[in-house]
Amino acid sequence: MSAALVILLLGIGYLVFTIDKKQENFPVPVVLVLIGIGLSFVPYFNQVEVTENLIYDVFLPGLLFVSAYQFSTKALRENAGMIGLLSTVGLGLTIVLVGLTIFWIGGWFFSISLAGAFVVAAILAPTDPASVVSILKKSASDKSIADIVDGESMINDGTSIVLFTVLSSMYLQSQSLDIITVFGDFLYVSLGGILLGVAVGWVMSKAVHITHHRDYQVMLSIVLAYGVFQLAESFGFSGVLATVFAGIMLSWEFSHTNKEDHYREALSGFWEVVEPSLLSLLFLLIGIEATKYLSWDNWLLAILILFVSIAIRFLVVGSTFKVVAGKKHKSIWKKSLVISWSGIRGSMSVFLLLQLETLATGEAAAELISLGFSVVILSLIIQSLGIHPLSKLLASK
């Protein structure tokens, strides 16, 4: 991409963020994706090439870090049980149930293998709260809902990549499922990323305390966000989980110093500019890139899978609430419905789809990729637009 193109896309993003001040009925990411789809028909934007490396190495570390750094450590502690279960056991159960559904329903439309169905389910498993967290904070009656959605998304991005890697290997190489190997790989990648993120986040927090100049503190935060990501990947750990826990560790360390406001003011002033800039570019590029995959005949299948996956997520979230809180938690099913509807697919799903396109060839893989992109775009539009009226409706009852 040329510098002129990047500046043009940033300018479009600025206009959208400026016009859409409330971000309620028409949240910014949805508007950006729709504009991106429109731009794909303009010849000038034919030069745009979105790769999985661009999303994974450039956009995700920054967005994950700022989400983790801004996430309240108090909220994480209060909702640790829900967030932990939903992003691990809940994610795995969702993939199994959605995969079986895709295999059953998908067979009515085109030939699909069980392994292929599980791959699509893994691609659709990670959630992207960028579209809805600000809306939930304004409209949901229980503020913990936004914290659960945001916290779950940060962690399930990492676990979904691990599960996608395993399932895509089975799909491409016709391997049998070895539970012990899968569990061992999952522990190595996940725990390695978490421990490395905590360690590097702690070290960097001490360096920030020593460095009194605000500009240098910002520089350290950039090194932390992108450096720990690449370091973890070089060891075969999860870069996503390393970045998330480095950001959480930095935030936790700041909360235990009498100069917390000083440190947060310096870093927030920078990252609050970077975040909308990255979001503008990312969702415009998603819209531009997705268009080429949306010309297919099975939109009914995509719609069915979207709503079935929401229903499955509703059952998983409600069951997790029962396990964690039991009868003590009020309005379990209302909150479960809002959290389930808030499980929007976004940047991580697009990255996994582009990675699958790199790994797989043939008509069968092309069908799976088109199906995945269709569900992602439908999810972004339908769920994002529905979250405000749904949360308001349930809050009023």
Image (spheres, rainbow, N blue to C red):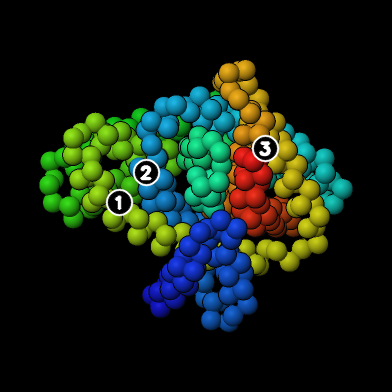
Of the residues under marks 1 and 2, which one precedes in the sequence? Answer: 2
Residue corresponding to mark 2? 70
The residue sitting at the top extreme is 327
Percent x, y of residue 7:
40, 74
Residue corresponding to mark 3? 397
- Closest to the observer: 391 or 76? 391
- Tags 1 and 2 in contact by the CB under 8 Å rule? yes
Percent x, y of residue 272:
35, 55
Say left or right for 155 vs 72: right
What quarter of the picture does the N terminus occupy?
bottom left
| Secondary-structure class at tag 3 | loop
Query: How far is mark 3 from mark 1, CA to CA?
Result: 37 Å
- Closest to the observer: 383 or 119? 383
| Secondary-structure class at tag 1 | helix
Say left or right for 1 vs 107: left
Residue at 37% over, 43% down: 70
Identify which amino acid the numbered label 2 is placed on: Gln
Residue at 20% over, 49% down: 217
Query: How far is mark 1 from mark 2, CA to CA?
Result: 8 Å
Vertical placement of residue 274 versus 160, above or below: below
Query: How far is mark 2 from mark 3, CA to CA?
Result: 31 Å
Residue corresponding to mark 1? 268
